[in-house]
Image (cartoon, rainbow, N blue to C red):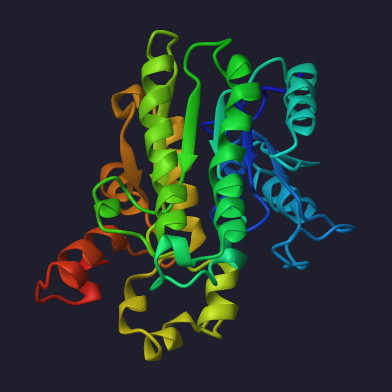
Amino acid sequence: MQDTTGTGPLAGRIALVAGATRGSGRAMAVELGRSGATVYVTGRTTRTHVSEVGRASETIEETAELVSEAGRASGGKGIAVPTDHLEREQVRALVERVDAEQGRLDVLVNDIWGGDHLMSIPSSGKMWEQDLDKGLRMLRLGVETHLVTSHYALPLLVRRPGGLLVEVTDGTAEFNKHYREHLYYDLAKNAPIRMAFGLAEELRGLGCTAVSLTPGWLRSEAMLDTHFKVTEENWREGMKVDPHFAISESPVYVGRALAALAADPDVARWNGQSLSSGQLAREYGFTDADGSQPDSIRYILEVVYGGKEASAEDYR
């Protein structure tokens, strides 16, 4: 069972971050660990196996090590469990392991995605002109995985009042009123918002909370090295490719957003809502790694879509 002698605000809490190999999932797991939680991290890429995403340098073992390192002073710990969340028996076994080892689950984060390599579907083509297999695979990776995970993990989460379910997506409900790329991507990124909304109703009488959470323009590993050919250290060079990249944020930001939610004793006030890292930074007072508070969602809605005369610095 979990040692509750840690000193962090989440000491003694048990979290499962499903889809923690890289990007926002890794950062959220690390920040939960920094706050003292024991964090089970899952994904398909390990030191001996590479998923279809094809990024061998990012593994769940490394994520678990980063969680434990961050949690050294607070009692946090990372535990890597290789899991394909489309494989029901693997997910069942994962939850049974958490139950056997900890007897509880306090935070469930559905961050599974792994669909970036399918984004070659042309955004300009009609749905019926696009690759059906790629589209359906995107929906399986971004929607079905969340449903499978919740099916097996929620019975453990609701065992104790105070549980938190976080559906991670790209965009808030307001932001996603704008059509996203193409039909498959639009469905994949709107579905978690509706999952959180629906599950909030189902969890309400059980003392648990469900929300959806999105980063802003995330400087993920793939965004940096594949799309902009930069690193986190010189990311501002990416503004030469797209000036709006000035409003981007590091994965640490959404990680801190999640940690703040998980530590909030009044988190139920957010039940069913669609939240963003920038919005929660204003509420809880945390910053990105550089000390700024970027609000990508509001910037894009007001400046890029709305035509407001303002700079990205006005939204940091």
Evaluate whether residue 23 shows in this view: no
Q: Residue furthest bottom?
A: 240
Left or right, 133 with reference to 205? right
Q: Is residue 299 visible?
A: yes
| In this rendering, position of residue 259 left or right of residue 132 | left
Q: Is residue 21 above or below residue 198?
A: below
Q: Nearer the viewer, residue 269 or 94?
A: 94
Q: Nearer the viewer, residue 208 or 76?
A: 208
Left or right: residue 205 versus residue 29 is: left
For the C terminus, give its image quadrant: bottom left
Quadrant position of residue 315: bottom left
Q: Residue at x 66, y 17 (%)?
A: 104
**Above/below status of 280 relative to 230:** above
Residue lying at 50% horizontally and 66% vertically, measured from the top left: 130
Where's residue 62, x and y in %? 76, 56
Using residue 171 as the reference point, say whether residue 300 is left or right of it.
left
Answer above or below: position of 168 versus 194: below
Q: Which of the 4 image quarters holds residue 110?
A: top right
The residue positioned 31% from the left and 78% from the top of the image is 244
Name the residue nearer the viewer: 107 or 136. Answer: 136
Q: Quadrant of the N terminus?
A: top right
Residue at image coords 60%, 60%: 134
Where in the figure is residue 112, as x and y percent of width and height? 60, 46
Task: Give the quadrant of residue 11.
Answer: top right
The number of discs equals: 0
**The residue positioned farthest toward the front in the image shown:** 128
Q: Where in the figure is residue 208, as x and y percent of width and height? A: 44, 17
- Residue 123, image x and y in percent? 41, 70
